[in-house]
Image (spheres, rainbow, N blue to C red):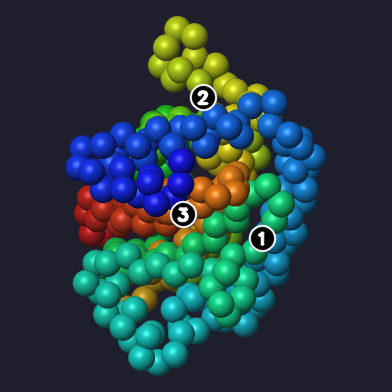
């Protein structure tokens, strides 16, 4: 079927969603199983490419911390910076996508896609310790971040170092449930500044979630919705509230040749929407606790 025919069918009223869903599921099934040629070899190269990218992000983050440029919007040109601060004060989430070159293209790696987004919110009338209390209250994250977080619990804690289990449920055309284990460390930079570093040490897609036959899919049998996740948080108390910044770098499977025009918008929208929801939910949860 040609692209023109597919588009014509999509434009025909109620059949549009049916065709989109059918094609999407077809693409996933074509590349999800162990019969996918070269999957294991591409997986190794994909992971290597992602880890090399994360090293560069880590270096960039450490350099900005050392330079005192704590929030990314402070590095914007004056007009863009003023606009961003205005939106934050109005309760909006400010976002930007990090790309690898001036043409807006992401880093290309074999067999996968890297998604790098930064976002920020401003929470008025609160203190830094209130924000940290919500972020570190992992046993209640299923309440604060529902429906994206379905379950959460602290597995262990040693001071500012946490090991946490989280189950994510994400829905867009299809529903995906993921069990994750995360290693998280918080750092207090000053009385008014703090940051944290989080790595997902284990991610498994769940088959038949909630059913009697629920199971975790082996890595080489999943759909590649989320293979890796690295996160950097920063919090700064000033201007009568707290600025909360999050950068999330994730890895998903790539898009089969010839169907990127249909599938890529679906895949690439999830990381942005998830980060935007997380920041908005953080703001809501902190404000719900009341002012000090």
Mark whose residue sits in front, 1 or 3: 3
* Dot 3: element: helix
Q: CA distance from mark 2 to mark 1?
A: 28 Å
Task: Answer few, some or many: residues within 10 Å of disc 1's Cα (few below 14, many 20 plus, some between 14 and 19).
Answer: some
Asked if labels 3 and 2 touch by Cβ distance under 8 angstroms, the answer is no
Q: 206 or 141: nearer the eye?
A: 206
Q: Kindly identify which residue carries mark 3.
A: 261
Residue 256 image offset from top left, x and y in percent? 58, 45
Image quarter in which the C terminus is found:
bottom left
Q: CA distance from mark 1 to mark 3?
A: 17 Å
* Dot 2: element: strand
Task: Answer few, some or many: residues within 10 Å of disc 2's Cα (few below 14, many 20 plus, some between 14 and 19).
Answer: many
Mark whose residue sits in front, 2 or 3: 3
The label on residue 14 is none
Q: Is residue 33 above or below residue 100?
A: above
Can the viewer see residue 279 in this picture?
Answer: no
Q: Is residue 196 above or below residue 75?
A: above
The label on residue 108 is 1
Mark whose residue sits in front, 2 or 1: 1
Which of the 4 image quadrants contains residue 13? top left
User: Which residue occupies 49% across, 76% down?
Assistant: 72
Side (left or right) of 245 relative to 185:
left
Residue 153 image offset from top left, x and y in percent? 48, 31
Asked if labels 3 and 1 touch by Cβ distance under 8 angstroms, the answer is no
User: Which residue occupies 38% across, 85% down?
Assistant: 81
For marks 1 and 3 on the same chain, the one whose residue lies earlier in the sequence: 1
Q: CA distance from mark 2 to mark 3?
A: 28 Å
Q: Kindly identify which residue carries mark 2.
A: 206
Asked if labels 1 and 2 touch by Cβ distance under 8 angstroms, the answer is no
């Amino acid at each position: 079927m040609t692209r023109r025919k597919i588009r014509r069918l999509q434009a025909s009223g109620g059949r549009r969603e049916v065709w989109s869903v059918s094609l999407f599921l077809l693409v996933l099934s074509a590349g999800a199983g162990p019969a996918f040629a070269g999957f294991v070899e591409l997986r190794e190269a994909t992971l290597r490419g992602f880890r090399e990218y994360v090293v560069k992000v880590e270096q960039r983050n450490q350099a900005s911390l050392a330079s005192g440029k704590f929030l990314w919007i402070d590095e914007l040109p004056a007009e863009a910076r003023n606009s961003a601060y205005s939106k934050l004060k109005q309760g909006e989430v400010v976002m930007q996508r990090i790309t690898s070159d001036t043409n807006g293209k992401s880093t290309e790696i074999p067999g996968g896609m890297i998604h790098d987004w930064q976002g920020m919110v401003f929470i008025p009338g609160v203190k830094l310790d209130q924000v940290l209390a919500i972020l570190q209250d992992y046993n209640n994250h299923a309440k604060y971040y529902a429906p994206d977080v379905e379950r959460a619990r602290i597995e262990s804690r040693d001071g500012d170092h946490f090991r946490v289990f989280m189950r994510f449920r994400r829905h867009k055309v299809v529903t995906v449930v993921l069990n994750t284990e995360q290693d998280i460390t918080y750092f207090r930079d000053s009385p008014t500044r703090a940051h944290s570093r989080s790595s997902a040490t284990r991610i498994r897609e769940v088959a038949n979630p909630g059913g009697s036959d629920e199971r975790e899919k082996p890595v080489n049998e999943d759909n590649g919705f989320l293979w890796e996740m690295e996160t950097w948080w920063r919090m700064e108390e000033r201007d009568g509230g707290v600025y909360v910044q999050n950068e999330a770098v994730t890895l998903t499977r790539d898009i089969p040749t010839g169907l990127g025009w249909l599938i890529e918008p679906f895949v690439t929208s999830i990381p942005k929407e998830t980060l935007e929801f997380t920041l908005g939910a953080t703001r809501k949860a902190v404000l719900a606790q009341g002012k000090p």
